[in-house]
Image (spheres, coloured by chain):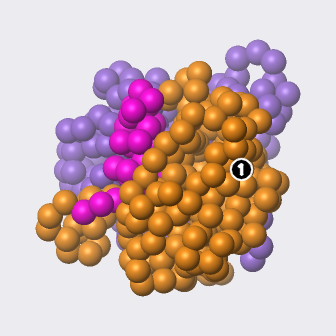
Chain colours: A purple, B orange
């Protein structure tokens, strides 16, 4: 169980499954994967969009690395609404966009710290999969963040396409949930 | 003048202007900027989309860094059609998506090499501004690459919002031009 506004990381072997559960409903989070054999070869939004030919990810979509290698595949998806456009929320984002003055929990630091325990450099952490995050792209390119579409118990399952390190957070930003930061449950299959 | 399928980099002081010219028309390229005082603080598509509230960039748009700092501002734009979704073309992309077997010129290496001369680590180079690249996002999120809309002589001007290193390429990928790789001219104001 990932407490609200925090993150954890795991090492997955090729073929291993991970399930991400929105326990109470209306909570989104970030997922960032890195190839275990090259700790600079992290997930890439731009490669994922190019290889899949779409910015809308759901069951069947593969998350690709900077070096065009498959990292994770979405094999089940009860929500079908995710984002890979926005950068993870960060300390600077809270200061600039929310006027926060002191330290604030944030997905970038939560991803980077969890992965640092496996030796992953902070520079590897770029754009995450913002699972359950509900972003609408207007015909003119304008972005609108709506409340997550996930209900209590909704979940998605990803399969490791190779040995990977994967970090998951429960997002700390106000727009990422239905008004109250909640936990995210992660089940890693043995 | 940047020869077809190659790249160059410059250091710009705050306020300095750079003009990017499609000399013959129908050619796109990549631009990637890095803060001169932190060589890991490179341009971020996700921060740029978040801060601007749109994926469509044109005059007035600011390119933000990973740490949410403004790097470059688009001050003039005769084309108004650019992309910041796709990752730069790369050696792996040419091998996987085009069946190329030997070394192939590519924007990622061209950006990374040009910036390496200023000490920028390769890991800093992520998603570039694909200037003049014409990408249409369908209502279902599907991506379609159309020929660049730029005509001979069309150009855009960017202003440095702080001291930056900026690399520019003329793109090596078939979809990035009107069928023939062409040069891109870059004018850096004194």
Q: Position of residue A86 (x, y in %)?
A: 63, 50
User: Residue at 55% across / 23% down in the picture?
Assistant: B38
Asked whether, in this view, residue A19 is left or right of residue A2, the answer is left
Pick the residue in front: B110 or A126: B110
Name of the residue lying farthest toward the right:
A99
Which residues lie in the magenta part?
B104-127
Name of the residue lying farthest toward the top:
A102
Q: Position of residue B74 (x, y in %)?
A: 75, 53
Say which residue label 1 marks.
B158
Asked whether, in this view, residue A138 is left or right of residue B32, the answer is right
User: Residue at 70% across / 22% down in the picture?
Assistant: A104
User: Residue at 20% across / 38% down in the picture?
Assistant: A37
Q: Position of residue A135 (x, y in %)?
A: 69, 61
Q: Is residue A180 above or below residue A21?
A: above
Number of other residues with Cα within 10 Å of mark 1, as a class: few under 14, some 14 to 19, many 20 or more: many
| Quadrant where the image shows the C terminus of chain A | top left
Is residue B57 among what the camera can see? no
């Amino acid at each position: 169980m990932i407490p609200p506004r925090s993150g954890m990381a795991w090492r997955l072997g090729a073929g291993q499954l991970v399930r991400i559960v929105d326990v109470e409903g209306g909570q989104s989070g970030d997922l960032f994967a890195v190839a275990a054999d090259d700790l600079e070869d992290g997930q890439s939004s731009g490669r994922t969009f190019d290889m899949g030919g779409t910015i809308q990810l759901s069951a069947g979509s593969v998350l690709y690395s900077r070096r065009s290698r498959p990292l994770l595949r979405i094999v089940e998806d009860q929500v079908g609404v995710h984002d890979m456009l926005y950068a993870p929320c960060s300390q600077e984002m809270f200061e600039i966009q929310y006027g926060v003055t002191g330290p604030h929990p944030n997905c970038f630091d939560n991803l980077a710290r969890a992965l640092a325990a496996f030796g992953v450099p902070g520079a590897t952490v770029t754009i995450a999969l913002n699972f359950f995050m509900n972003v609408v792209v207007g015909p003119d390119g304008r972005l609108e963040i709506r409340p997550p579409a996930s209900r209590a118990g909704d979940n998605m399952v990803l399969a490791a396409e190779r040995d990977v390190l994967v970090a998951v957070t429960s997002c700390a930003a106000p727009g990422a949930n239905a008004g109250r930061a909640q936990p995210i449950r992660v089940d890693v299959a043995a």
